[in-house]
Amino acid sequence: MAVQRNMNPHRCPMPVQDPSVRRHNFEEVALGYTYEMAVEEAKRCLNCPTKPCTTACPVSINIPAFIERIANEDMEGAYQIIAQSSSLPAVCGRVCPQERQCESQCVRGKKGESVGIGRLERFVADYHREHCTEKPAVPTPNGHKVAIIGAGPSGLTAAGDLAKLGYQVTIYEALHVAGGVLVYGIPEFRLPKIIVQKEIDNLKAIGVTIETNMVIGKILTIDELFEMGYEAVYIGSGAGLPRFMNIPGESLKGVYSANEYLTRINLMKAYLPNSKTPIRHSKKVAVVGGGNVAMDAARSAMRMGAEEVSIVYRRSMDELPARKEEVEHAQEEGIIFRTLSNPVEVLGSEQGEVCGLKCVEMELGEPDESGRRRPVVKPNSEFILDIDTMIMAIGTSPNPLIRSTTPGLTVNKHGCIVTDGDSGLTSREGVYAGGDAVTGAATVILAMGAGKAAAQSIHEWITAK
């Protein structure tokens, strides 16, 4: 059916909670498109034959095709197109950095705003969840078994793709619930956990088995998985080991890694009045870092009752790696951005608790190996922030447990597993890896892309034997 294009240069705004209200609750900030909004936004898509947006998608969703279905009001058809490429559409529609990927290549963005691809993906996934009552078809078993280590976005994606090909797939997850960073790292106000659970239930419905409380490298080794009859193993264990700055005072009471702080809130529900999980109820908080995790920690601290929350970042606003939308939401909620600042010491009270943060001002010099201008200390620029809590959000690295219990597994100097590239094959035959365990901390969608590529490689390897 021919679609009458919407040539409005501006995308349809996303309804959101009022900042003065949402900064006090953990309910989802973005409220999602209505049916009418989604159809009108879809009509802005020109259905380009070259599909530059699809090329820029790490999981290669046929973006023009699913948007065209929305424009024609075939919402279930749109979902089925997305589902061919993505096992987690409701998740990706909420947390994927579309502005740096598919939307950055949108032709409409050359003379206006790009099509709201992520918002449309979210709408379609939510519409399917709310309206579809049919259970997914269970694929015909092919007689082969594959083990997945880690039930985060990379492992879930690999498991879903392999299950659709008929493999008997078991995911071994160290925590007591599946989801990885989707449940312990990303706050409820960005990604409701009921959404994550529904995506996981969809995978279980097509035959994926998930074993929780299974720490691979301690309870079972990779060699023992092979002895159990698995023909291939995919390591998608993420990068959950937090980094610190190694400055004086980091052992004081009131210093958290962002991982610990967010896990206590998101996974253990410390924000609920009846929660048994202890967490500091702070008045003045400094979050060190400028990525999405820093934004999540700062916005969570505000919702936990802090009177003042600051982002302390050594570069300028222009270099912030966090998503533009997350930065804007943080600013609207009253988070203070203390850019061109870097901590040098955490100050403590006589009781051994945080009572201040000594920082220095920074200036931007020549670009470093990442292409960003290198921050250098501004002389005689020390100042002290009055805080009672500091949260370190400067990155994570893979846990050494798997590499230390798997002979012959090659890792690099950062502790990341080395693979041969897109296939995900490691130095061990039949052992594949991807996501943050290989790249270090990155995005959900890149981890999913790695899981998808590895699943295809595993399938090709097993069928060729």
Image (cartoon, helix red, strand yellow):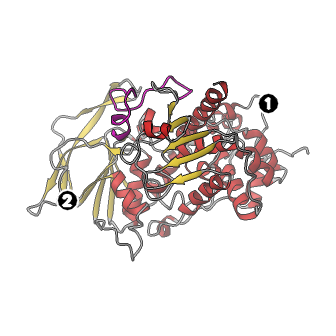
Crowd class of label 2 (few under 14; some 14 to 19; many from 20; radius 10 Å): some
Q: Depth check: give the residue in front, 90 or 143.
A: 143
Q: Position of residue 192 (x, y in %)?
A: 54, 61
Give above or below for 57 relative to 26: above
Extreme residue toward the left, this view:
350
Q: Does the magenta stretch include residue 405?
A: yes
Q: Where is residue 330 in the image (x, y as percent from the top left)?
A: 44, 55
Residue range (magenta): 397-424
Read off the residue under disc 2. 253
Q: Depth check: give the residue in front, 422 or 306.
A: 422
The residue shown at (36%, 26%) is: 412
The residue shown at (67%, 45%) is: 117
Name the dominant secondary structure of the magenta segment.
loop
In this rendering, does residue 235 appear at all? no
Q: Position of residue 405 (x, y in %)?
A: 35, 36
The amino acid type of the residue labelled 2 equals: Lys
Q: Quadrant of residue 320?
A: top left
Numbered label attached to residue 49? 1
Q: Which of marks 1 and 2 is in front?
A: 2
Question: Which of the image's four quarters has the N terminus?
Answer: top right
Circle count: 2
Q: Which of marks 1 and 2 is nearer the N terminus?
A: 1
Q: Quadrant of residue 244?
A: top left
Mark 1 near mark 2, Cβ–Cβ under 8 Å? no
Extreme residue toward the bottom, this view:
274
Give above or below for 306 relative to 337: below
Q: Position of residue 183 (x, y in %)?
A: 48, 56
The amino acid type of the residue labelled 1 equals: Pro
